[in-house]
């Protein structure tokens, strides 16, 4: 490729394989300003080159920008780990052009005022497009009812304890939300009562100095299944849209239906870590792969991979949760949970597709198309004329290389994928018609836009 950095005026990306809406075709994409002007098959006509910055894709893949609908950018209040500037830079380095950030910050994002403060912060520093959840608590139903859901992705409910202090254990509260708040509810589904019981039983028998292999024993299949069953039952009772976050078990898949997300009352997300790892790797990777819900057995990993292909899993998001490595030291009880994933999520998923676990079209569907459909994100997630020019150029036939911690852009400075050898890389990321990342260089002056939502409520 040439070394010209395209401007926001008019850019032609040609000689590429466009992957979009279940098709792969040789062609080109012309952008004008922030939008896609033309998508064509075959060689680009001479008229497209006129007045345009031309980017020769050299036969590589051109995908819609990834929409990561589940991130924890730690801003405000936990910015020693990460913030919107550093993590949005990691995002565009990995082909992620839009993100939706979770509310368990300090202070928590549990009011429209707090959402607006985060929107204002993102407008000044975020390289990717941005949106935010509002969090549910036992006391903020009035705030949830008053929120502007054209500017808020949905309501996030923590049914099990995780980072932050936003636990909603009472089904009556979740039922009130579903009855009174006309917006998608996204849940972290772990049963808190059973989780506490498991922890107490394990500590009573083995003591508190527990190796990491006990993490999925405490946060086991029953912890996830019981909470997911409760949430799904309430969704059907009140005919309310529900999105199950970071599904980690094979048994939860029995609650889900196959096919595309259109018309589904209950949709589901999993994360790359649940597709790549199993509990057999705690011995080697330890707290680097400690997250909530816990990574579980090989049979769960394999069932989740099949569910991605069949459509029981609708979206793949990262649950990007950076912590400093010093905070990851400790036992199954004391090491913090969460891992940075956003920079290498697309690379990992494409590598898994290359190895035959699913096809590239499915990766694009789960990481680009379906997030836009489920959350009703305005004109993003597809390569279509009139849509925002959020695009990713991927070299899927590069010389194999090994990911290391030194590659990490996130402030925390590490990745659980260190040591993984892959054969693809992001060459260029375009956000709203402007190049934000190219050939290893991030252009930190680029700013994303606020996402707008119009989901079926």
Image (tube, rainbow, N blue to C red):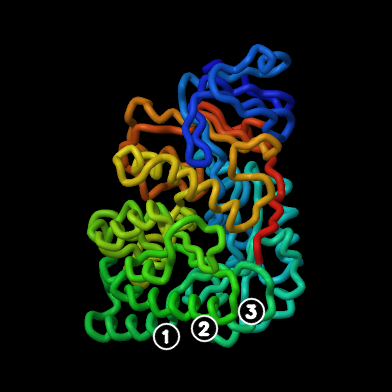
Q: Residues within 10 Å of mark 2 (few under 14, many from 20)?
A: many
Q: Earlier in the sequence, mark 3 or mark 1?
A: 3
**153 vs 38: above or below:** below
Q: Earlier in the sequence, mark 3 or mark 2?
A: 2
Q: Which residue is mark 3?
A: 177
Q: Which residue is mark 2?
A: 169
Q: CA distance from mark 3 to mark 1?
A: 21 Å
Picture residue at 47% right of the left edge, 81% below the top: 230
Picture residue at 31% right of the left edge, 37% below the top: 421
User: Which callout, 3 or 2, points to the residue nearer the camera?
Assistant: 3
Q: CA distance from mark 2 to mark 1?
A: 8 Å
Q: Residues within 10 Å of mark 3 (few under 14, many from 20)?
A: many
Residue situated in front as seen by the camera: 401 or 149: 149
Left of 284 or right of it: where is 295? right
Where residue 167 appears, as percent x and y from the top left, is 54, 78
Picture residue at 52% right of the left edge, 18% below the top: 1
Where residue 145 appears, as percent x and y from the top left, is 73, 75
C-beta proximity under 8 Å, tags 2 and 1: yes
Where residue 350 appears, as percent x and y from the top left, is 39, 40
Residue situated in front as seen by the camera: 288 or 20: 20
Q: Quadrant of residue 379?
A: top right
């Amino acid at each position: 490729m040439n070394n010209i950095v395209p401007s926001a005026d008019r850019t032609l990306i040609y000689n590429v394989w466009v992957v979009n809406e279940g098709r792969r075709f040789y062609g080109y994409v012309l952008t004008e300003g922030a939008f896609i002007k033309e998508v064509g098959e075959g060689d680009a006509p001479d008229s497209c080159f006129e007045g345009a910055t031309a980017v020769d894709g050299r036969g590589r893949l051109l995908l819609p920008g990834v929409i990561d609908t589940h991130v924890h950018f730690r801003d405000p209040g936990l910015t020693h780990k990460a913030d919107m500037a550093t993590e949005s830079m990691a995002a565009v380095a990995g082909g992620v052009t839009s993100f939706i950030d979770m509310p368990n910050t300090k202070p928590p994002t549990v009011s429209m005022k707090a959402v607006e403060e985060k929107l204002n912060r993102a407008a000044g520093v975020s390289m990717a497009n941005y949106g935010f959840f509002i969090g549910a608590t036992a006391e903020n139903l009035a705030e949830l009812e008053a929120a502007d859901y054209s500017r808020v992705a949905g309501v996030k409910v923590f049914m099990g304890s995780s980072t932050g202090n936003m636990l909603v254990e009472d089904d009556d509260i979740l039922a009130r939300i579903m009855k009174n708040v006309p917006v998608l509810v996204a849940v972290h589904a772990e049963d808190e009562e059973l989780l506490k019981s498991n922890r107490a039983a394990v500590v009573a028998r083995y003591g508190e100095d527990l190796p990491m292999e006990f993490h999925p024993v405490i946060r086991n299949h029953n912890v996830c299944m019981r909470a997911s069953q409760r949430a799904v039952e309430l969704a059907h009772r009140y005919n309310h849209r529900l999105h199950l976050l970071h599904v980690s078990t094979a048994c939860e898949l029995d609650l889900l239906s196959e096919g595309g997300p259109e018309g589904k009352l209950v949709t589901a997300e999993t994360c790359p870590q649940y597709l790549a790892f199993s509990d057999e790797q705690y011995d080697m990777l330890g707290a680097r792969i400690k997250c909530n819900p816990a990574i579980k057995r090989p049979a769960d990993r394999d069932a989740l991979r099949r569910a991605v292909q069949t459509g029981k899993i609708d979206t793949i998001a990262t649950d990007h949760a950076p912590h400093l490595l010093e905070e990851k030291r400790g036992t199954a009880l004391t090491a913090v949970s969460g891992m940075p994933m956003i920079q290498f999520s697309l690379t990992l998923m494409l590598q898994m597709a290359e190895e035959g676990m699913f096809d590239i079209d499915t990766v694009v569907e789960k990481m680009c198309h379906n997030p836009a459909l489920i959350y009703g994100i305005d004109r993003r997630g597809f390569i279509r004329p009139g849509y925002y020019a959020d695009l990713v150029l991927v070299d899927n036939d590069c010389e194999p290389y090994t990911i290391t911690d030194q590659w990490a852009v996130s402030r925390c400075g590490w990745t659980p994928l260190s040591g993984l050898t892959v054969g693809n890389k992001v060459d260029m990321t375009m956000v709203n018609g402007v190049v934000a990342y190219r050939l290893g260089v991030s252009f930190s002056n680029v700013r994303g836009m606020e996402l707008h939502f119009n989901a079926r409520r």
